[in-house]
């Protein structure tokens, strides 16, 4: 949905950017300013997530650090310039972090999968704007996690792929996906688990069948496959459909590549140095749309309309290369990648509007040092795109009470296109943050 809350979710983030634009058919190319690195104060940053931590209307970056075992929020000054803010200790070796409101107070909180600590850390933001440890949930060797309202009760749950501790040799045995159920206060308890492949490593949450419930797709590094787990609609997952994968599938991202209305996915192969674009054939079956080379040791991918032409492009990061690969969607497929300099071992990559101009930018967490890298999008959309007034949900050229009512009517997790304009901060959920943005943007769009 951009799902999923990968930084409050990625496919939804990408779609949300597209929804704010009126585009003419054209082939465009994304252009980025030279990267800027910002020191986080931690070390070995492999996980990043986007959320408006301080509720000032721009996206901040939550960064997890494998060596210092902490989460640090990088605060955005509104122009895409960042400085370290609040931090919070977590368990041992937090590979990733996901941000979202977990306790229902309107402020972003976080969860991390702690691989060596065999736990999930829950950190909450208190009324003073500080992050405080709240809960450690025992989960054996969690590889990654995402947050989404899996049971439809209005709060975000945590979905965790992990090793099966009961197996005689867990590293070589099928893993599990477990849903941690939120009681509404940000306190979680384990729900049902579903078997998956060997050594899960990447995942995404999105609505693959269009029923309004978030589904789960997982990459399995050692069994060389993916698992698609559909939501039963009651907070449980149906048995996995196994999807053939490339050698060592590392991470997956989702989007509608061919604009046929069905959700597709892309997966990066760690060992083959390729990205495979798969299209949805229906009935939980997928076929290869295209495959292209990546740089050495691809680690992550993300989707968004980077060039403003109305379709979703994809960016891949690499821990073994000093470049990102940007794959431009030209309508009939993806062009050969444009390489963007991004040194220091770019691990996780995300797409989001960071500097206030609504063009989606790129941020990475860097495993080789204590930084995040920010790539500001400098593409010229003026000839191809008319940007609507932010907050003007009903497009009547004024931000007013009708837009407030539109936010209320679309309240909740944003799982289809009908709610995208109401999700003003593009975080995957229509909530109090969007109401506050409508109020802050109040007035005539021409002013």
Image (tube, rainbow, N blue to C red):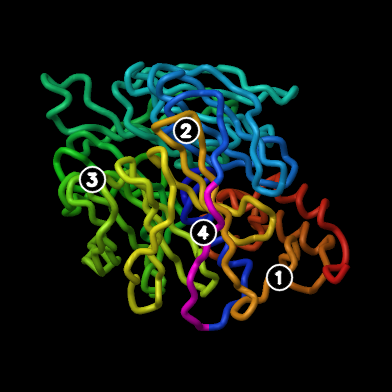
x, y (%) of residue 399? 82, 63
Dot 4 and dot 1 residues touching (CB under 8 Å): no
Q: CA distance from mark 3 to mark 2?
A: 21 Å
* Within-10-Å neighbours for mark 1: few <14, some 14–19, many 20+: some
SS for callout 1? loop
Q: Which residue is mark 2?
A: 97
Q: Earlier in the sequence, mark 3 or mark 1?
A: 3
* Numbered disc 2: secondary structure: loop
- The image quarter containing residue 379 is bottom right
Residue 301, percent from left and from top: 38, 51
Q: Are marks 1 and 2 in contact (CB under 8 Å)?
A: no
| Magenta stretch, main secondary structure class | loop
**Which label's residue is closer to the chain start, 1 or 2?**
2
The secondary structure type at the circle numbered 4 is helix
Residue 62 shows which numbered tag? none
The residue under label 3 is 270
The part of the chain drawn in magenta is: 25-35
Residue shown at the point (75%, 22%) measured from the top left: 128
Question: What residue is at 41 percent from the left and 74 percent from the top?
Answer: 259
Nearer the observer: mark 3 or 4; the answer is 3
Residue under pointer 1:
388
Nearest the viewer among 350 and 233 is 350
Q: Is residue 200 above or below residue 89?
A: below
Q: CA distance from mark 3 to mark 4?
A: 24 Å
């Amino acid at each position: 949905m951009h799902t999923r809350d990968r930084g409050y979710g990625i496919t939804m983030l990408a779609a949300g950017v597209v929804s704010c634009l009126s585009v003419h058919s054209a082939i465009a190319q994304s252009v980025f300013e030279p990267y800027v690195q910002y020191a986080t104060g931690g070390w070995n940053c492999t996980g990043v997530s986007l959320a408006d931590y301080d509720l000032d209307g721009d996206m901040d970056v939550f960064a997890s650090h494998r060596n210092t075992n902490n989460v640090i929020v990088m605060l955005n000054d509104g122009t895409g310039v960042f400085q370290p803010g609040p931090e919070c200790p977590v368990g041992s070796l937090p590979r990733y972090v996901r941000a979202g409101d977990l306790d229902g107070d309107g402020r972003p909180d976080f969860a991390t999968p702690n691989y060596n600590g065999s736990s999930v850390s829950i950190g909450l933001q208190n009324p003073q704007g500080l992050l405080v440890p709240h809960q450690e949930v025992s989960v054996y060797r969690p590889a990654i996690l995402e947050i989404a309202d899996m049971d439809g009760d209005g709060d975000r749950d945590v979905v965790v792929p992990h090793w099966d501790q009961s197996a005689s040799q867990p590293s070589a045995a099928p893993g599990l996906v477990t849903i941690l159920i939120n009681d509404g206060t940000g306190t979680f308890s384990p729900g049902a688990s579903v078997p998956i492949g060997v050594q899960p490593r990447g995942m995404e949450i999105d609505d693959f069948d269009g029923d309004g419930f978030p589904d789960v797709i997982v990459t399995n590094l050692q069994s060389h496959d993916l698992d698609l787990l559909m939501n039963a609609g009651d907070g449980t997952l149906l048995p996995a459909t196994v999807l053939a994968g490339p050698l060592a599938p590392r991470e997956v991202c989702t989007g509608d590549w061919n604009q046929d209305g069905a959700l597709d996915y892309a997966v990066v192969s760690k060992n083959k140095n390729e990205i495979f674009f798969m299209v949805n054939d229906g009935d939980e079956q997928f076929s290869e749309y295209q495959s292209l080379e990546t740089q050495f040791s691809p680690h992550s991918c993300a989707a968004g309309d980077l060039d403003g032409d109305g379709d979703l492009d994809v960016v891949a990061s690499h821990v073994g290369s000093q470049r990102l690969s940007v794959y431009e969607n030209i309508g009939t497929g993806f062009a050969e990648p444009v390489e963007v300099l991004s040194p220091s071992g770019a691990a996780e990559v995300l797409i989001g509007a960071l500097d206030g101009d609504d063009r989606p930018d790129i941020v990475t967490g860097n495993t080789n040092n204590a930084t995040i890298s920010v790539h500001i999008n400098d593409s010229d959309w003026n000839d191809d795109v008319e940007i609507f007034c932010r907050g003007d949900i009903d497009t009547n050229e004024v931000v007013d009470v009708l837009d407030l009512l539109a936010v209320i009517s679309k309240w909740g997790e944003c799982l289809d296109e009908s709610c995208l304009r109401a999700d003003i901060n593009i975080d995957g959920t229509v909530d109090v943050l969007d109401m506050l943005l409508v109020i802050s943007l109040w007035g005539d769009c021409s002013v």
